[in-house]
Amino acid sequence: MIARPSLMLLMASAATLSAVANGVTAATPQTSQQDASQASAPKTRLGSAIEQDMAQRDQQAAERRRSLQLREQAAVAAEARLQASMASQREAAAEGDAAAGAEAEAEGVQYDELARIYQSMRPKNAAVVFEQLTMDVQVEVAKRMRERNTALIMANMTPEGAAKLTMALARGRAVDEAQPAAARPQAR
């Protein structure tokens, strides 16, 4: 008796051979004949519409990229301008502070010289001239004088002038002379 292969075994081997053949076909690169046949094939309306759509999308994406690049360049330029502006403002502020400091120093030197002049005068003569000065100048000069000389000059001033100067020195600022006497705070 001859053994016959079963139908199931034959079917399985045919399926295996078919799978191997399909795998080999899929693994080999396409031939140039297939490429040429596809390129020469007439385009359908659907294919043309899809290609046009894709071209439009590519163009829009390129425009968006260009727009974003321009925005980024503008932002970088604006930031550079802002930093330059801030640097110039800092320099101007530093120069202004230096000028204000130099001005205050020059003013301080002037008051020091006035204090030295009034200290060298006789208290009676200095008091007459001292009372003619504005309250701000009196205060600044008195602050720079020795206490003994300031006391001698104030002793020779009128009582009202000496009181105003005393109040201004006590507060650390000049009393506004335009303010009426009734509105001024009274010391108790």
Image (cartoon, rainbow, N blue to C red):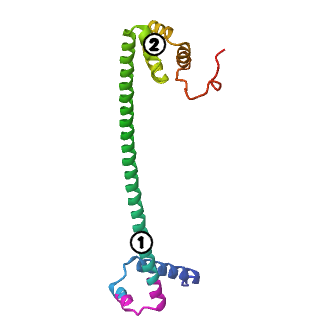
Which residue type carries mark 1? Glu
Q: What residue is rendered at 54% in x and 79% in y?
A: 12
| Relative vertical location of residue 95 with respect to residue 83 in this rendering, above or below | above
| Relative vertical location of residue 51 with respect to residue 100 in this rendering, above or below | below
Q: Residue 149, how many percent across, how many down?
A: 44, 8
Q: Majority secondary structure of the magenta segment?
A: helix
Pick the front one: 166 or 146? 166
> Could you say whether the residue bearing mark 1 is in a helix, strand or loop?
helix
Quadrant position of the C terminus in the picture: top right
Q: Residue 168, how many percent across, how many down?
A: 54, 19
Q: Residue 85, how many percent across, how many down?
A: 38, 48
Q: Mark 2 points at which residue?
A: 127
| Magenta region, residue range | 36-51
Pick the front one: 74 or 146? 146
Please tell me the numbered disc located at residue 63.
1
Pick the front one: 113 or 58? 113
Which residue type carries mark 2? Ala
Please tell me the numbered disc located at residue 12.
none
Residue at the outermost bottom position: 42
Residue 99 is a magenta residue: no
Residue 89 visible here? yes
Pick the front one: 93 or 30? 93
Q: What residue is rendered at 42% in x and 15% in y?
A: 144
